[in-house]
Image: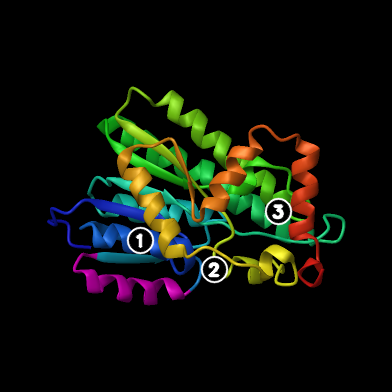
């Protein structure tokens, strides 16, 4: 990456497709240079696409579910020898199905990516941002963070962790010049449901939000320094508001109807 560029630098994880790619596009369209990362080779194709916006784009292929992957990314961030204005900690994965039947290794990998890597990377980048007295961090949580999530039990818990983590950090860092924003999308038209094995569920087969809209709302909230944004359709915002006053047992039952295997045909 050209070290003499005067454009601000943003880092986006999970940027080869879906919300991550669209977040990276938002940064590129708003005159940021980019360092983007994902575990798959598609990250390099994404970089080629994003360069059409005129900025510098560097890509890193790394598995952030491993300590080595996070360390490798951070080394690449440091190697730019540039301060980064923003980071979108977006990489995540889901696992659907009855907890007693789902694969343990897949769920441990989910925890490694959705929880451990989030803490690991945040520890590195926030220390640097606070020492400079500036920076913006976007954590991609989920509307699922606000309710028990039967048939996505580990995923829902991981996103609840991420939301709580982001909100706690925001308060800790309120006088440092660093802002923390949590992005909470609802069901979005990405590869998430296919990868999670949830295409036969009501939520997997149902209408989904446009990742372009979700990313735009997330970017705007980040740049405005907001605490969080429930992105996508008005339905998501209503659901989030209702979640604040609805008993956990009721929310769990509602989620079950959406995520239970075979519910797409019911």
Residue 131 sits above or below residue 88 on the image: above
Q: Answer whether residue 37 is visible to the viewer in this image.
A: no
Q: Quadrant of the N terminus?
A: bottom left
How far across and down, in percent of the image, does residue 264 sit? Answer: 76, 70
**Callout 3: helix, strand or loop?**
helix
Q: Which numbered mark, 2 or 3, is in the foreground of this view?
A: 2
Front residue of this view, candidates 214 and 175 = 214
Front residue of this view, candidates 114 and 109 = 114
Front residue of this view, candidates 143 and 180 = 143
**Callout 1: helix, strand or loop?**
helix
Residue 155 sits above or below residue 36 on the image: above
Q: Residues within 10 Å of mark 2 (few under 14, many from 20)?
A: some
- The stretch drawn in magenta includes residue 53: yes
Which residues make up the magenta segment? 41-56
How far across and down, in percent of the image, does residue 4 sit? Answer: 12, 56
Q: Which residue sits at x=62%, y=51%? A: 112
Marker disc for residue 24: 1
Q: Give residue 201's quadrant in the image.
A: bottom right
Marker disc for residue 108: 3
Q: Residues within 10 Å of mark 3 (few under 14, many from 20)?
A: few
**Callout 2: helix, strand or loop?**
loop
Marker disc for residue 190: 2
């Amino acid at each position: 990456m050209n070290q003499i560029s005067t454009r601000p630098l943003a880092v986006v994880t999970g940027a080869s497709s879906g919300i991550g790619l669209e977040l990276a596009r938002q940064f590129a369209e708003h005159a940021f240079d980019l360092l983007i990362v994902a575990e798959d080779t598609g990250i390099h194709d994404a970089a080629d696409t994003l360069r059409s916006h005129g900025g510098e784009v560097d890509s890193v292929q790394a598995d952030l579910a491993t300590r080595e992957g996070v360390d490798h990314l951070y080394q690449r961030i440091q190697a730019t020898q540039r301060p980064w204005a923003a980071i979108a900690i977006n990489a995540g994965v889901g696992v659907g199905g009855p907890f007693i039947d789902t694969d343990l290794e897949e769920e441990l990998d989910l925890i490694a990516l959705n929880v451990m890597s989030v803490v690991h990377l945040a520890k590195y980048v926030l220390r640097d941002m606070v020492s400079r007295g500036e920076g913006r961090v976007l954590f991609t949580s989920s509307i699922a963070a606000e309710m028990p999530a039967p048939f996505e039990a580990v995923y829902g818990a991981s996103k609840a962790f991420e939301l709580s983590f982001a909100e706690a950090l925001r308060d800790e860092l309120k006088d440092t010049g660093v802002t923390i924003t949590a992005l909470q999308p609802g069901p979005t038209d990405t590869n998430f449901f296919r990868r999670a094995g949830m295409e036969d569920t009501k939520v997997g087969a149902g209408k989904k939000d446009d990742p372009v809209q979700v990313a735009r709302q997330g970017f705007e909230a980040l740049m405005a320094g907001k605490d969080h944004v429930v992105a996508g359709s008005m339905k998501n915002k209503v659901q989030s508001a209702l979640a604040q006053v609805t008993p956990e047992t009721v929310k769990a039952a509602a989620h079950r109807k959406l995520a239970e295997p075979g519910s797409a045909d019911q």
